[in-house]
Image (cartoon, coloured by chain):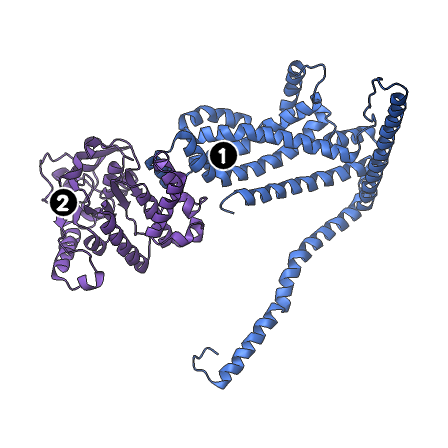
Chain colours: A blue, B purple
Amino acid sequence: MTTLTNTPSDKVSASQSALRVLAETFSARALGDRAQALLLPTIGLALFVAFWHVMAPQVNTSLGTFPAPADVFEQAGQLWQEHQSEQERAERFITMQENRNAGILADNPDAEVRIRDYPGAPTFFSQIGTSLLTVLSGFFLASLIAVPIGILIGLNRYFAAAVNPLIQIFKPVSPLAWLPLVTMVVSATYVSADPMFEKAFITSMITVTLCSLWPTLINTSVGVAAVDPDLLNVSKVLRLSFWTHVFKVVLPSAIPMIFTGLRVSLGIAWMVLIAAEMLAQNPGLGKFVWDEFQNGSSQSLSRIMVAVLAIGFIGFVLDRIMLLIQKKVAWNE
Amino acid sequence: MSKSHLELTGVNMSFDTPDGPFVALENIDLKIAEGEFVSLIGHSGCGKSTVLNIVAGLLQSTRGGCVLDGHEVNTPGPERAVVFQNHALMPWLTVYENVQLAVQQVFRKTMSRKERREWIMHNLELVNMGHAANKRPGEISGGMAQRVGIARALAMKPSVLLMDEPFGALDALTRAHLQDALMDIQQDLNSTVIMITHDVDEAVLLSDRIIMMTNGPAATIGEELVIDLPRPRNRVTLANNPDYVRCRQAVLSFLYEKQTFPSKDKPATGAPSPAPSATVSDTDQPPTKAADTAATSSHDAQARERAIA
């Protein structure tokens, strides 16, 4: 097959090999590889659901048996229904007010009219919205603090040595330990007649910030300290000013490390948030879980399980989004 | 040769190591004329790079100094552009942007935006890299990236071009190609060049003068060799030129007969007694007694490697 002479038999073998390539493309193995990519995760998921389905009824609690997949699915639908009917009610409430206001204005054009917000309880889905807003605010604030300080630590080893003990001590602190302190400080300092944000929101956000800034801080400082010495020499030879040096050499060089840190930070922020919301009573997913637990109805466990799955899924999606941004921004991707 | 353009006088360099000071360079005296192409050659770890870094201003000599056009060199600057061994291009910038970073910095005040753009492209064309202006360093070969590194250095219009083993990381064919390109460019621009190399053929082919360094520690200039071959030089026809062969022979004999590989017979010492000789430029530095008796440990060798690096 590998002879170099061009004989008729070689032509035959050439067409044969072309066929073989074609055959290999659609061979059982190639198809199998592609199927494997989808099949194995599906099998894993199916096995897990089956195991869950079988085991759940065996676990008895004071609120009935542990929710089986079907119960959870049912409650997910239920929560969606509640959300929609609540939205309809809210719309009706607003249109009712608007109609009434129109009437008042027709009688007296100078009358002062107001529209009140719908006073109903937040639904599961609006709680997801609150949680996302809180986690993103906390994460954004953490990044705003961690990246500049990380750069300073990476650039200056004296500063790094001075700050290092603080990082080592505060990094492992649980959000639950911070929360009472944050709550009290926020209560004492965030005083306003017409607050823009709820205190619970501020408390949760700050707790998220305090717990999630460390990975970004550490990764940024490592990334900055690890800039290729040749590039640093280029910067010296060019006599770049401090800011040009930071923005044109150091920061781009550290971007991949910074993003690795940001992804870890966002993951931690999301985990911390649920705990913070439970205790701070911020109307997000954490509060949903806590309220359902306190409520203690026969459906509570199923509804909590819906929240657990939603939390996991959202965390996964957040990580994927960060990965996409990283691929857009980082030069090494 | 015209009056000296760059002058190193009594340069000594010692590094602090955990085992005490390590003397890397001792009594380096070197005068380089404008437009001269000088190669530094010597075994690994003999402090060639240290000399170059002192001229670049990236290292400060312990004693002695370096004067360029009547000004002492203390800090790095674009008038002493450096070409690094592995191109040292910013991987996140395109080829054009890499040169632009340098041009922007050096000619921000003296050139208009349009002039700068033309100057960047001119330098890229000089090294035949105009076609790849919008590629990133990761998308081009090592040889091409090194061309861009040279273009960036040339774009600074340096008084002295410092090249630290510029072709060391390239394959033989690419290296030959770039050597020819460098010869042409140097011929055109009449730039002053100091180049570090390991390669005897490269040194003889490119240089007006070869500075041969003794082995460290306390390395110094062992011999100097003026290469009087006519330019332009052609590597193929030179191969049989008796002058070329003689020069090549001289360098080889220095490197492999007078200065054998350092770790074998030149032990590292904490602080060798400095030999107070006034002129060492044409004599082979004899090993000191202290150096002869001290034992070499691998630890010392490692410390020395670190200090040199």
The quadrant of the image that shows the C terminus of chain B is top left
Q: Chain of mark 1?
A: A
Instruction: Give the residue drawn at x 37%, y 35%.
Output: B108
The quadrant of the image that shows the N terminus of chain B is top left
Mark 1 is on which residue type? Thr
Mark 2 is on which residue type? Gly
x and y percentages locating residue A215 in the rendered image:
54, 34
In this rendering, the answer to whether A112 lies above or below A77 is above
In contact (CB < 8 Å): disc 1 and disc 2 = no
From mark 1 to mark 2, how far is it between C-alphas? 47 Å
Instruction: Give the residue drawn at x 48%, y 25%.
Output: A165
In this rendering, the answer to whether A180 lies above or below B71 is above
Which of A211 and A248 lies nearest the eye of the viewer? A248
x and y percentages locating residue A138 in the rendered image:
62, 29
Residue B285 seen in this snapshot: yes
Is label 2 in a helix, a strand or a loop?
strand
Disc 2 packing (10 Å; few <14; some 14–19; many ≥20): many
Which of B145 and B116 lies nearest the eye of the viewer? B116
In this rendering, the answer to whether A184 lies above or below A212 is above
x and y percentages locating residue A295 in the rendered image:
83, 29
Q: Chain of mark 2?
A: B
Q: A151 left or right of B177?
A: right
In the figure, residue B232 lies in which quadrant? bottom left
Task: Identify residue for label 2.
Answer: B222
x and y percentages locating residue B226 in the rendered image:
13, 50
Disc 1 packing (10 Å; few <14; some 14–19; many ≥20): many
Task: Identify residue for label 1.
Answer: A220
In the figure, residue B52 lies in which quadrant? top left
In this rendering, the answer to whether A89 lies above or below A20 is above
